[in-house]
Image: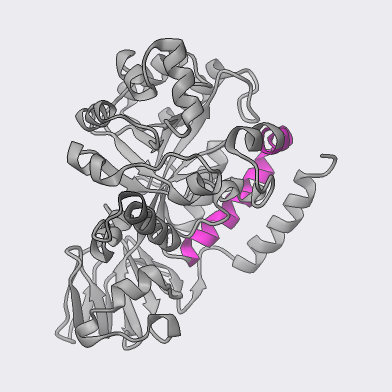
């Protein structure tokens, strides 16, 4: 569908200040909104009487194609899960499998209201093509480890060279998709690899992404080897560039939080994955806020989460922070929604005929808590003025086709294991 301004009539709209409005609104191509007088030249008029319009979700840590691995190795702790389930399976990973897994993941994200993903997975050029076709936004970070991987069988040197080529080739969709560098972790990348990746980030201006301080074992091993905790160690080798994405951060000292803040890093809270894998440590949201760290929210991959639904992730974040800090005031509905949608320029509409959204409350005051803690169906998704989902049907991805393709791909993926 063409992009442009749309009028949504008689609707509820949640603005960027978390205020609920009722009326007729124009959703503009540049991501802004304004009240409608009813006589503007618009691309489409939408009956919003049973819709709640909000900003879309931003998923700041994904491994999209790992939907292929959903529900394998259930009940195993992180390292055993990786070594006995994930790594053996990934030896069979091909470009075709990454394509089908990514397509299914994107379909799920659109259907649940997400329009941006910061991804780290193999064959990033394939991921880029699928994301471009879907219409969503993304930072696609090619993964780097010192050991061979499915997309870089010769290891870190080949990975850096290929990623540099991707960066030189430019974005498949400028202003919506960027390539970046996904240094996996301090325990899979040598100091030399980490520094070379940082140098390439500085040279090109691309985003660096890394898993850090996810488990107690990782933190203890880093300290035993370097005399420093992971974020301290990364700082000591001049790794960080502006806006580095640090996933998990469950075992982080206050000194490390100040380091993250000083570098303008994004610390990504992934509560469901960390709880499911029994990582033990939970990012301390209040301490991160006190240190001035930019916190974002992510699902991690569907293999460790079983979902890419950011509405569920927002609920999990709110609950675990309240539980862990014995404080029911932490991450109330407005702050939780702001965390999950921070930076969004896009719009989603939710189905108010969904019984989970009732009662709305006086002046719609119950709408946001109901949405976060109960849920609702996504009707429409608009990205840069383009409708990529309308009336509950995704227009840019064939959901049924993606589902069938995923089933056949999984059968091929696990054959012989």
Q: Residue at x 20, y 28 (%)?
A: 262
Q: Nearer the viewer, residue 272 or 170?
A: 272
90 within the magenta span: yes
Residue 186: tell me if it is visible: no
What is the x, y in percent for residue 251? 39, 33
Q: Which segment did they paint magenta?
A: 85-111
User: What residue is shown at x 54% (from left), y 57% (from top)?
Assistant: 307
What x and y, as percent, mark residue 327?
27, 56
Residue 258: in magenta span: no
Residue furthest front in the image:
326
Relative to 272, say whether 126 is above or below. Answer: above
Where is residue 177 shown, x and y percent of the image?
A: 40, 45
| Left or right position of 54 against 414 | left
Image quarter of the N terminus: bottom left
| Along the line of sight, the residue nearer the viewer: 120 or 79 | 79
- Residue at left 31%, top 62%? 346
**Residue farthest to the right, as pictured:** 416
Q: Where 31 falls versus 257 (above or below)?
A: below
Instruction: Provide the major secondary structure of the magenta segment.
Output: helix
Q: Quadrant of residue 370?
A: bottom left
Q: Pick the residue in front: 410 or 275.
A: 275
Q: Residue at x 53, y 15 (%)?
A: 157
Quarter of the figure that contains the C terminus = top right
Coloring basis for residues: one colour
Quadrant of residue 50 within the rendered picture: bottom left
Residue 222: percent from the left, percent from the top? 45, 18
């Amino acid at each position: 569908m063409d992009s442009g301004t749309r009028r949504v009539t008689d609707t509820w709209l949640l603005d960027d200040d978390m205020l609920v409005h009722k009326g007729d609104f124009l959703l503009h191509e540049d991501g802004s909104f304004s009240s409608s007088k009813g006589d503007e030249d618009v691309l489409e008029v939408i009956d919003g009487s049973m819709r709640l319009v909000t900003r879309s979700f931003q998923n700041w840590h994904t491994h999209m194609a790992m939907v292929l691995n959903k529900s394998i190795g259930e009940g195993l702790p992180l390292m055993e899960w990786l070594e006995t389930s994930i790594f053996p399976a990934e030896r069979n990973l091909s470009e075709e499998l990454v394509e089908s897994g990514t397509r299914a993941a994107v379909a799920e994200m659109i259907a649940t209201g997400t329009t941006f993903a910061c991804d780290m997975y193999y064959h990033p050029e394939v991921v880029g093509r699928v994301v471009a076709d879907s219409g969503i936004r993304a930072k696609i970070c090619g993964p780097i480890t010192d050991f061979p991987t499915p997309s870089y069988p010769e290891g870190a040197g080949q990975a850096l060279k290929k990623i540099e080529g991707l960066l030189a080739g430019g974005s498949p969709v400028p202003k919506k998709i960027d390539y970046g560098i996904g240094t996996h972790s301090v325990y899979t990348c040598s100091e030399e690899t980490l520094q070379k990746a940082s140098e390439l980030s500085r040279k090109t201006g691309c985003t660096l992404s890394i898993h850090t301080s996810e488990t107690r074992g990782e933190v203890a091993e880093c300290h035993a080897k370097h005399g420093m905790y992971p974020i301290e160690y990364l700082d000591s080798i001049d790794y960080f560039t502006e806006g580095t994405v640090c996933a998990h951060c469950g075992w982080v000292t206050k000194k490390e939080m100040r380091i993250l803040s000083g570098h303008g890093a994004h610390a990504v809270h992934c509560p469901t994955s960390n709880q499911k894998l029994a990582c033990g440590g939970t990012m301390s949201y209040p301490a991160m806020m006190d240190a001035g760290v930019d916190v974002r929210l992510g699902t991690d991959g569907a293999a460790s989460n079983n979902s890419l639904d950011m509405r569920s992730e927002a609920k999990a974040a709110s609950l675990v922070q309240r539980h862990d800090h014995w404080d029911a005031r932490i991450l109330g509905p407005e702050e939780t929604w702001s965390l999950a949608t921070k930076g969004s320029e896009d719009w989603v509409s939710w189905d108010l005929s969904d019984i989970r959204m009732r009662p709305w409350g006086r002046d719609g005051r119950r709408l946001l808590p109901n949405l976060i803690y109960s849920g609702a169906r996504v009707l429409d998704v608009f990205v840069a003025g383009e409708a990529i989902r309308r009336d509950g049907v995704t227009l840019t991805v064939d959901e049924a086709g993606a589902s069938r393709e995923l089933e056949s791909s999984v059968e091929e993926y696990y054959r012989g294991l």
